Image (cartoon, rainbow, N blue to C red):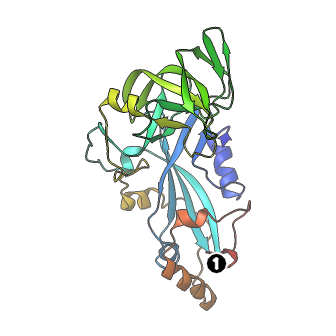
Amino acid sequence: MNYESFEQLTSMFVEGKITPHKQISVGDLSFKYVCSSTFSLNEIVNENQTGGMIFAAEQPNTPWLVFVWETSNTRLVPVGVKQIDRAAIITEQEERDPNHIPDIVEVKITSLPNSSSVKGRVDTGATLCSLHADRWKKVGNVVEFVSPALSNSVISVPLVNMQAVASPDGGVEYRPVIELNIKINGKPLKDVQFNLNNRDGMGEPILVGQNALEKGRFLIDPSLIRESKINVNWDKLDQEIANVTGPNKVDNTEKIQQVYNVLKESNITLAELVEYIRTEIAQTLESIEY
């Protein structure tokens, strides 16, 4: 989702015209969702907690965004977007060994200008890395292809080889092999070979194979957290967003209490509830199926 300014983003959010997505852009700045309040919706309503969804800035020295929700009567209501300095709400994490990685990693193609970071699935049984390509064609010693996860433009790189791969029907298909400079979880790797393959329906656009794992001397630990997590000081965050105001909260009625008795049992979180919002306006909570 792209927005021209923070004013436009805030206005559309407060008016209920948008629900935050995993990745958003404001002007030339990019932000990605990292976490939300750990309060259940029952706590937000009955214990007067404010819910927040945090988006981290991908550019250094840029404030992070917090989307603030409240409940009014029986409605979940967006009330504002707050820009907050990272240091104001984040506590330091214990540093991990960069060679220990989970089975889903962040991959950045550094040899392709302006390419986005994408998720890669580690496959210790694959000889080479693989990159999703919708279509490709060989032009002399160059291969041209489209990979929407990296760029909306046609990508042209030198062709290194053609890899023979067994096809599902028992035959053999030949995939172009290219070399790319990459970073895996921030660790740079040079001249890593990738074959081009249609990975539609496979979840991640990149498969990280043995060649990258050996080059980076990585150890795989699937128990590591797959998503990038941060340690948020929720007490500090609550103070930071205290002045983000929305509709005045009303006293719980017996009817509202019945709704949240159900939520208390399920302990649904704000982030989980937002997943259910499908219309462009704040929904009545009683109409949401859990």
Give the residue pinned by disc 1. 73
Name the element at disc 1: loop
| x then y, percent, for residue 129 | 47, 31
Quarter holding the N terminus is top right
Residue ID at (60%, 88%): 253
In the image shown, does 26 or 275 lie closer to the viewer? 275
Task: State the residue lying farthest toward the top.
Answer: 140
Q: Is residue 288 left or right of residue 188?
A: right
* Residue 161: image location, x then y, percent: 53, 17
Quarter containing the C terminus: bottom right
Residue 171 image-quadrant placement = top right
Query: Residue at left 60%, top 91%?
Result: 254
To which quarter of the image does residue 70 belong? bottom right
Can residue 112 be seen here? The reply is no
Q: Is residue 114 above or below residue 171?
A: above
Amino acid on which the number 1 mark rests in the picture: Asn
Instruction: Identify whether 143 is placed above or below 272.
Output: above
Q: Residues within 10 Å of mark 1 (few under 14, many from 20)?
A: some
Position in image of residue 78 (x %, y %): 62, 61
**Labels in figure, total:** 1
Residue pushed farthest front?
170
Does the rendering let one see residue 117?
Answer: yes
Position of 287 relative to 241 (above/below): below
Name the residue nearer the viewer: 27 or 132. 132
- Name the residue rendered at 60%, 25% in the picture: 174
Extreme bottom residue here? 254
Q: Tell me: 66 left or right of 167.
A: left
